[in-house]
Image (cartoon, rainbow, N blue to C red):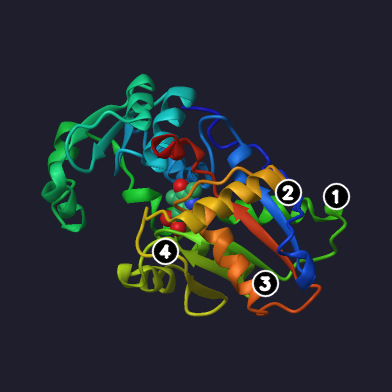
């Protein structure tokens, strides 16, 4: 288990889009989707501290859970194959054949399908007991790599962006804009910023999913703003969203997927057009990856 803690630098690029120009907003994108062809996006950052802990404890493997399109399980399985540790994945629902699941198998992850009721039990205190019995001494990572350890690794995201500001010709920036699922990545950015720059989170899940409570628990009450961006529910895709994604890709060559990054950028577009940001505002949009998951929607 070596090499997992040298994360590649995500490029910070200027983003020229027609809907920004009339409002004088400058946008740069930190391309976490480009750090690696397989271990993509924010998930490697969220796994970093977990893998350090697993290594320190001499764990033979790492076990976690997710759905049949999970970017988190995909990154974990790819990391296991690359860096030499065993992985097991507990999956929501019944056996399904998706491009993601095929990759998990190819990466050597042991898969267990929990059904829907079985998966809903994941927050219960004794949920992990049988799995810890089956995989003794393996390190368990909560769903999506959430929690304090996940947030901690995301501080590196802020460091990577700041190191590239001079190359962009920016002396400073005015805030972050990113998609929030569990809110762990957002909480990590809030912690790393420590009030220096605000962090704007676009919620990919409905408002009642407890993200606000989770972010408060991880990072306190200040330093961030949450926007509703789920457009009727997680993984709900509408024609306007699809058209927006296609337009951004055609105009700026920026690939987006509809669950997180597409919804987040569309929510930013709506805020910009509503005149929320003053002309001259410089924002960093976090491309949190997830492009492997869009194979399922092609
Ligand atoms: C998992 C994921 C997110 C959400 O990250 P959280 O830390 O759970 O908020 C955002 N974007 C993409 C592409 C993801 O895969």
Cα distance between the residues tagged 4 and 3: 24 Å
Cα distance between the residues tagged 3 and 1: 20 Å
Depth check, front residue: 202 or 36: 202
Q: Secondary structure at mark 4?
A: loop
Spot occupied by residue 265 in the image (x, y as percentages of width and height): 58, 59
To which quarter of the image does residue 285 belong? Answer: bottom right
The residue at which mark 1 appears reads as 167
The image's mark for residue 197 is 3
Ligand 1 within 8 Å of disc 3? The answer is no
The residue at which mark 4 appears reads as 230
Cα distance between the residues tagged 2 and 4: 26 Å
Q: Secondary structure at mark 3?
A: loop
The residue at which mark 2 appears reads as 12
Q: Earlier in the sequence, mark 3 or mark 1?
A: 1
Marks 2,1: beta carbons within 8 A: yes
Can the viewer see residue 200?
yes
Cα distance between the residues tagged 2 and 1: 9 Å
Quadrant (top left/top right/bottom left/bottom right) for the C terminus: top left
Q: Earlier in the sequence, mark 2 or mark 4?
A: 2
Q: Is residue 36 above or below residue 124?
A: above
Q: Is residue 173 above or below residue 81?
A: below
């Amino acid at each position: 288990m070596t090499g997992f803690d040298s994360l590649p630098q995500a490029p910070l690029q200027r983003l020229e889009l027609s809907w920004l120009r009339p409002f004088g907003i400058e946008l740069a994108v930190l391309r976490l989707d480009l750090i690696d062809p397989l271990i993509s996006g924010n998930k490697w950052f969220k796994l970093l501290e977990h893998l350090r802990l697993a290594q320190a404890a001499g764990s033979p493997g790492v076990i976690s859970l997710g759905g049949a399109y999970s970017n988190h399980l995909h990154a974990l399985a790819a990391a296991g194959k690359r860096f030499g540790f065993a992985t097991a994945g507990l999956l929501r629902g019944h056996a399904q054949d998706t491009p993601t699941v095929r990759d998990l198998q190819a990466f050597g992850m042991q898969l267990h399908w929990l059904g829907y009721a079985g998966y809903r039990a994941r927050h219960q205190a004794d949920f992990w007991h049988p799995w810890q019995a089956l995989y003794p001494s393996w390190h368990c990572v909560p769903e999506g790599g959430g929690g304090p350890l996940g947030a901690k690794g995301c501080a590196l995201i802020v460091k990577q962006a700041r190191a590239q500001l001079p190359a962009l010709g920016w002396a400073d920036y005015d805030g972050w804009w990113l998609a929030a699922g569990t809110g762990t990545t957002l909480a990590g950015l809030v912690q790393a910023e420590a009030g220096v720059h605000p962090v704007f989170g676009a919620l990919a899940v409905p408002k009642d999913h407890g993200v606000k409570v989770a972010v408060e628990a991880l990072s306190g009450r200040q330093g961030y703003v949450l926007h509703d961006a789920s457009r009727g529910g997680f993984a709900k895709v509408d024609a306007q969203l699809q058209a927006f994604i296609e337009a951004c890709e055609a105009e700026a060559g920026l690939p987006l997927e509809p669950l997180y990054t597409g919804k987040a950028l569309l929510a930013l577009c709506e805020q910009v057009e509503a005149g929320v940001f003053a002309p001259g505002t410089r924002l960093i949009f976090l491309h949190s990856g997830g492009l492997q998951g869009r194979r399922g929607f092609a």
